[in-house]
Amino acid sequence: MTIKRCLQMHGRDSVATVMIDIKEGGTVNIFSDENISLGEVTALDDIPFGNKIALVDIQKGDKVIKYGSEIGEATQNIHKGELVHVHNVKSLVVDIPPSFKSEIMRQMNITRRNE
């Protein structure tokens, strides 16, 4: 049986990177950067390999933390277990044009949730 893992790179992180495709409803094991088991989270969305899963509830306007640093700002409430991507986070580094966001969402089959 394959262990479904995600990696939290810093103790402050509100997200982790999934290391295998995760289907909605699947359980993923959270590991630290030192390979210490930190618990589990249930995916509320399909989350492709290499993408971020929320480890905690993140409120609209909150900063999203990865590698111990602020990488973006939540544009809507994000629930623990949801995919964290361009549809619910505004980058603090790159201003992604709306048409690019729409194309990324289309290619990843991401739909917006109604809050």
Image: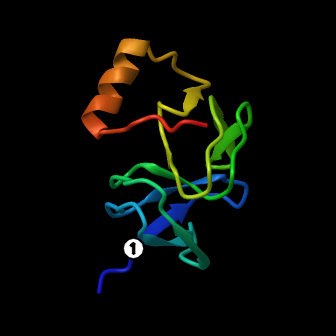
**Relative horizontal placement of residue 114, taking residue 2 as reference (left or right):** right
Q: Is residue 52 shown above or below 70?
A: below
Q: Quadrant of the C terminus?
A: top right
| Residue visible at 57% across and 26% down in the picture | 90
Residue 3, position in %: x, y? Answer: 38, 80
Q: Is residue 8 shown above or below 77?
A: below
Using a 10 Å C-alpha cutoff, classify the residue at mark 1 as few (fewer than 14 neighbours), some (14 to 19) or many (20 or more): some
| Residue visible at 43% across and 59% down in the picture | 18
Element assignment for label 1? loop
Residue 68, position in %: x, y? Answer: 69, 49
**Relative horizontal placement of residue 95, taking residue 12 as reference (left or right):** left
| Residue visible at 51% across and 63% down in the picture | 7
Rendering quarter of residue 26: bottom left
**Relative horizontal placement of residue 96, taking residue 88 as reference (left or right):** left
| Residue visible at 38% across and 52% down in the picture | 50
Residue 88, position in %: x, y? Answer: 54, 34
The front one of 107 and 64 is 107
Q: Quadrant of the N terminus?
A: bottom left
Rendering quarter of residue 102: top left
Q: Is residue 115 shown above or below 83?
A: above
The amino acid type found where label 1 is placed reads Lys
The front one of 91 and 109 is 109
Q: List the residue tagged with mark 1.
A: 4
Residue 20, position in %: x, y? Answer: 33, 64
Rendering quarter of residue 32: bottom right
The front one of 55 and 46 is 46
Residue at far front of view: 114
